Image: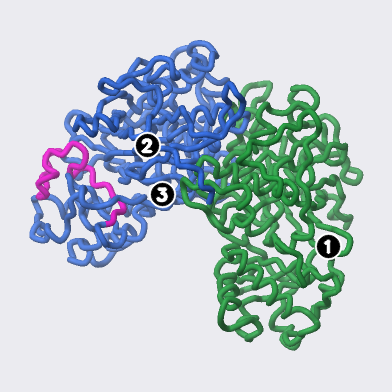
Chain colours: A green, B blue
Amino acid sequence: MTIDETHDPSLDCWVESAQGHVEFPIQNLPLGRFQSVGGQPRTGVAIGAHVLDLHKALALDLLPAEGEGAAAARQALQNPLALNAAQRIRLRRDLSTLLSTGDGAARRYADELLYAQADVRMLLPSPVLGFTDFQAGIHHTINGRRMRGSGADSLPANYHQVPIAYNGRASSVVVSGAPVRRPHGQIQSPSGVVYRPTQQLDIELELGIWVAQGNALGEPIAVDNADAHIGAFCLINDWSARDVMAWEMDRLGPFTGKSFATTVSPWLISPEALAPFRGPAFVRPPGAAMQPPSHLYSRAQQEQGGLHIGLQVFVNTLRREELGAPLVLVAESHTSHLYWTPAQMLAHHTSSGCNLLCGDLLGTGTISGPAPGEGGSFKELGGSGKQPFSVGEEPRCWAEDGDVVVLRARAQREGFSSIGFGDCVGRVLPAQGMHHG
Amino acid sequence: MTIDETHDPSLDCWVESAQGHVEFPIQNLPLGRFQSVGGQPRTGVAIGAHVLDLHKALALDLLPAEGEGAAAARQALQNPLALNAAQRIRLRRDLSTLLSTGDGAARRYADELLYAQADVRMLLPSPVLGFTDFQAGIHHTINGRRMRGSGADSLPANYHQVPIAYNGRASSVVVSGAPVRRPHGQIQSPSGVVYRPTQQLDIELELGIWVAQGNALGEPIAVDNADAHIGAFCLINDWSARDVMAWEMDRLGPFTGKSFATTVSPWLISPEALAPFRGPAFVRPPGAAMQPPSHLYSRAQQEQGGLHIGLQVFVNTLRREELGAPLVLVAESHTSHLYWTPAQMLAHHTSSGCNLLCGDLLGTGTISGPAPGEGGSFKELGGSGKQPFSVGEEPRCWAEDGDVVVLRARAQREGFSSIGFGDCVGRVLPAQGMHHG
């Protein structure tokens, strides 16, 4: 993860929409899967407001036809997550050359190569073979316990040593833009337990980690080797039905209250694109500052392992949207609130020998800050249903039918072009009448 | 699930090893995936001590070459779990004819068609796309709470209404026979938290449910339709590192303490083969006998939904095995201790809209009986580490290196041939030195 010429902020791109683009400048170059109207699923590269069709770039001989470069590009056509680090770096360089003004040979094929992002449908970038959700956001953990009455600043007894996680449901992971149907569930009400639509539909702002290289069953990944297994990052909205969870959770964690939809952003933001935005990991406060167990700790990891990315939650209501009113920013947070690094999460995940696969998606857990307005969930922003926050003129405690929730992430650092993740969007549809299938 | 001529106990089979076979008589006919020495993976049918090669049966024109029968057989070659109910029934009838003495046309090809089970390696019958583990064994739940000090006969507050479950780890599901490496994990010790091999390696005796037909996201499966989504049953040994779990579990359930290996038996025991062994589901004791919520209840389901299958746990130690001593029966249990039916589990799983897939594996949770010697885990059999049980002359509280654990299931009813599941076997290997990968 070194910084090289592909990060040069003075690098110019012949795709006009990429000039000064705050999410997808030529320094980002994330891969994804898209489909144009009537077309087959294809691999593309986000550049400005456009998508570059990688299949066409190969067909037009704009990428190497032989050797490692060709192998990397062809692998990306099959599954853009499955590239190894060397292949990702190679393809990134080739794409940087293809799209830079300095070379510019590809510019005359612009009409064939580029689609407007607004005109294509994004797909999941990879099949999701597993979904694991961590609880690495320390302020969300503290807030959750405070709201359950465990006292201020309390953490689970194992929090400083275990990157707590549970297995989520992979099949219900959907790509940004997919509608989110308000789920039914068993809910405890004053008149007894009923099966009805949730009345506490919530969101969770998370960073996602895509595993590109797995490990063999029985062979844990060492914390210092773990970064090499990570293929990409994304945003995750881990939709949650709080009233369903409150009733179903005993000791085994959330189940139906989380398995109706988990929205991920479509672009594979590479570790290479994020290289300038690495820095020291969470600094443990004095007192709580016991070191993690040695198999999860290394000085190099602690100094290099953290990601520094700003996060935002926007909401629009159906009524505001009908009036043409814009999205409302309801929360801002930052990945520096993560208590564990991605590498520590992978090392812990595999510490008993569990095998990760290419296609495993890991969520960090909700990333909240300590201050008001930094909650990564409606539960935190709305005082657990008791202190509504505002979306323009409209109060909200939980997501209402018709609401649109948009998560955004932006990595910024002086001397570098900013890198964005692309929107992670979901709109709430009303609960379905129960015609059982 | 009607009883038809394929269940006729007087049906004779020309494969001699199937005559009077207590597990794989001609009335069972489970499909599975196997590999002979040097051969490709193939679909086969267990018959007596043999496997019938379905690919060869088709090549030799011993199964229909056209129409629905041919379609069913060809589907079985690809993925024997993916057959729908009509295809399973059709193939079962064709196989019953092929293997019965009455027809007998296939007998002359016996040498080409049959492999000794001892000579082949069994594979997973289907890719495991998801693994969900329920807690439907009511006595295991009561025993667990008692051992944690929650008082006798106590159950979670939601137990009578929620078929409690959590998402397990699918990638670490292995087929019977695969070795089970003693896992490392974070463990709380008197001298602090350490990362070391588990000292409380346990087993869990479970029934497995293979989902053959999924459902669309957002469209729950009704309890009365749920049986149609089930393709097969199997045995599961859900290996558990109790000391790791004790430290890692806060509110989100087990994670690394369960994700190092989950052993499944290799044969797809069909709902059709088990049709004679269905009967009324768990009868709720008076007092606790509140009805489940209406979306999980129907009279028909309650009267038809239960499976009646005897279960056994055998152990051998390395020392006994070296002396040629046989497996020791350490526990007996029965599926009638399941509080929820498979159909209720599927209905609950999808109640918030979660989509099941062909290849989802559901475990019932540990099935223990109420009496001593009926524990489905070593934790229960060995008094949570304090009252060792015996394997011959050797005391056991937890699984030791070299131990072999064998789970067996047998459905029996007067007037019918017994149906077995085949062994679910795992041998414990010593923990690996930590050369991090």
Assess whether mark 1 and mark 3 are in contact (beta carbons under 8 angstroms): no
Which labelled disc corresponds to residue B212? 3
Does A417 appear above or below A279?
below
In this rendered view, identify the residue nearer to me: B36 or B92.
B36
Of labels 1 and 2, the one closer to you: 2
Relative side of B255 to B235, left or right: right
Whether residue B29 appears in magenta in the rendering, the answer is yes
Q: Find out whether residue A296 is within the magenta segment.
A: no
Q: Residue at x 48, y 48 (%)?
A: B171
Find residue A350 and report its horizontal and vertical position in percent. Answer: 55, 44
Identify residue for label 1: A418
Q: Which chain does the residue under circle 1 lie in?
A: A
Q: Which three-letter amino acid code belongs to the residue tagged 2?
A: Val
Residues at marks 2 and 3 on the same chain: yes
The region drawn magenta spans B9-35
Nearer-N-terminus badge (2/3) = 3
SS at circle 1: loop
Total numbered badges shown on the rendered structure = 3
Residue occupying the point 68% across, 77% down: A94
Q: CA distance from mark 2 to mark 3?
A: 31 Å
Tell me where residue B43 sits by quadrant.
bottom left
The answer to whether the residue labelled 2 contacts the one labelled 3, judged by CB atoms less than 8 Å apart, is no
Residue A229 at least partly seen: yes
Residue B428, numbered label? 2
Amino acid at dot 1 = Ser
As shown in the figure, which amino acid type bears the numbered disc 3? Ala
Is residue B272 positioned above or below B289 on the image? below
> Closer to the observer: label 2 or label 3?
2
